[in-house]
Amino acid sequence: MNVRHTQMKKFAVHSRERLLAVTDENTAYTSFMRLCAIAFVCPQFISQLSELSVTERHSAFEEKCKEMAGQYGGVFNNDFGNVEYPDILFSEILAEISGISLDRDDALGWAHQYFNEPYRTGLAVGLKKSKRLRSEDIAPATQVFTPDWIVKYLVQNTLVRRWYEGGGAKLSGFDEYIFGDIPQLSAIAAEDMKFLDPCAGSGNMLLYAFDVFVKIYRSQGFSDNIAAEMALKKNLFGLELDERACAVAETALRIKAAKLGSNTRPQVFNFSGGNVESFAGSLSIPENCTGGANAILSMKFDVVATNPPYLGHSSMDSKLLSFVQEKFRNYSADLFLAFIVRSCELVKSDGRLGFLTPYTWLFIKTSEPFRRLILGEKCLDTLVQLEYSAFDNAVVPLCMFTFFNSPADRMCQFLRLADFKGDMGFQRQMMYRGISETDCSYRFSAKAADFLNIPSAPLIYWLSDDIRRIFELSSLSDVADVREGLITGDNDRFLRRWFEVSIEKCAFCRETEKKWYPLNKGGDYRRWFGNREFLINWEHSGEEIRNFRDKNGKLLSRPQSVEYNFHRAVSWSALTSGRFSARYYDENFMFNVAGSCAFSTNYAHTMWLLALLNSKVTDVLSQALNPTMNMNAGDTARLPIPKYRPNRHIKQLAEECVKLSEQDWDSFETSWDFQKHPLI
């Protein structure tokens, strides 16, 4: 985060704290945003205000806000009710705002996000605790301001590219992030091009698209005021679920247009006033919306570019989940998938779309229908995969990509930044280098068919053709039973470390009738043997876990795959920050969801699988199938496996590795078979 953003975030968060100490949240937000907007558009008024008495400041500020309402609408409108500005706004906060940098078009957007950051953070904590998100909290919880260079990449590779494909004049300064070939298609008149951001937020995508359209109109000889007016009337459209963010977008666009001499109101609308589906925002059909939202959802667009909300199905409330599963059944795993599919419906068949989303859809099994849609029925054009933790504002692995809304026999251009650790500034530098240098080592090209022929169609674009062909082999699930273990519903209640339980109550052998049994619970990176730390309450065949219910009788546990307990297995950790690692467990263990397993009835085959899963090739292939930290049973089940041929040497080597790893594990007191430290 650069100095400017650090300064703004500190100012916004501190202002929020002070305002909420003396007034309600709505007044605090409205007061803060109006002060920021005036400082943005009229900094000299802030200086004049500082010279007045506190009483005079109140009246002068109120008059200025009324004046601004006519010019810039949005945050100055009275939609939020009458506001009684607190005195602290005109003392401490007014004194500080003059030192805040508000000289960029996106300044109001950042002010909006940072003021709401504590609330958004609180909602995120709830999501981590598996709490479902209320409909009214969807917008604030999922709204993340998109960095300007990502906005440029998305708009340039959709809107500007479409302009160039139609033979449009070169737009100097608006194409530095375009890469790949530009085919020549039918020409399109500037006034006929329609751009939509269906998840507009505070409008940063629209602000940059506005600059592009103004540049286009200028190239055709239009004056600035006419160019701005035509851009807002004919080209730019936005929809946003959050009424406040929508107001910020309107004000920011009107301020931008006013600098060019236009007072045209932007076509940016929220969904207030609609019927029961207004909670779904742009996922709704026109008939279920009113006013501007109805009109926009009834149109067809040439370009859609947006940063849609990210929300897994487990975090959706029942109303939203039911809606998404009914309307977007194959794409209901995450809200962003549904938004992309809905956006395709809003775009013409020859249109372009661009998105910033989590990159999990490139690999995970549940997103296979979406991959087949993008690769088979659309045409992926460009994709940039960012480093796992590069984005400060969203702790999710991200990618940005653009595609055509119809199939085409074209090469897609990929940039893999996943190996370049660093902040978003460094990611931008590496992306620009990758675009500029066609022979860059982390730039790749491939066709959709290259992936559609692979089981589950993962976008393993960085692997060679030879490695891709490995996926034509049988998968692990074809040669072994791959299973996910049980879920207790409350690990604190049903699990213990082995040294926390009386030895008389522990069954370290499955035949013994005891209360506590050894449990394979995944764990840290460790190959061959180990991570034998936990016990599970499986007294009377797990009677308590099998009947663990809430007060309404709903079963909280999931006693799945219990018939595979107490069988030898090859296991791996579902969640790990290290490389893929497999371990051997004998017939005395149970396993839970964090310690997924592959079962074979043949001991020699089990050892062969263990050796194969601990090989370097498997490590590469597992990263291809799922490069996130969560390698679940479904991902591992897709690993390609060569034909099994009994090999005594491999079996002996695997057994030797298990024995060495076992000796290492037992040399520390965390093992229940510890005797003495090897140095003694």
Image (tube, helix red, strand yellow):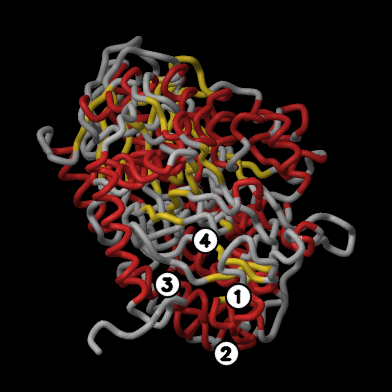
Under circle 3, the secondary element is: helix
Q: CA distance from mark 1 to mark 3?
A: 47 Å
Mark 1 or mark 3, which has the lower sequence index?
3
Secondary structure state at the residue bearing disc 1: strand
Q: Is residue 280 left or right of residue 206?
A: right
| Percent of width and height locating residue 278 | 74, 41
User: Counting residues from the N terminus, which is met first, the one under dot 1 or under dot 4?
Assistant: 1
What residue does disc 3 label?
Answer: 8
| Amino acid type at image mark 3 | Met
Determine whether, in the image, residue 263 is placed left or right of residue 609. Answer: right
Instruction: Name the residue tied to disc 2.
Output: 53
CA gap between label 2 and label 4 equals 70 Å
**Residue 264 - label:** none
What's the CA distance linking mark 3 and mark 2? 26 Å
The Cα atoms of the two marked residues, 4 and 3, are separated by 48 Å
Q: What residue is pinned by disc 4?
A: 520
Single out the mark in the foreground, 1 or 3.
Answer: 1
Q: Quadrant of residue 593?
A: bottom right
Residue 238 x %, y %: 56, 39
Q: Amino acid at mark 1?
A: Arg
Marks 1 and 2, the one that precedes in the sequence = 2
Residue at far top of view: 186
Reply above or below: 439 against 469: below
Closer to the camera: disc 4 or disc 3? 4
Kind of residue sitting beneath label 2: Ser
Please tell me which residue lies in front, 79 or 430. 430
The answer for how far apart the CA atoms under marks 1 and 4 are is 12 Å
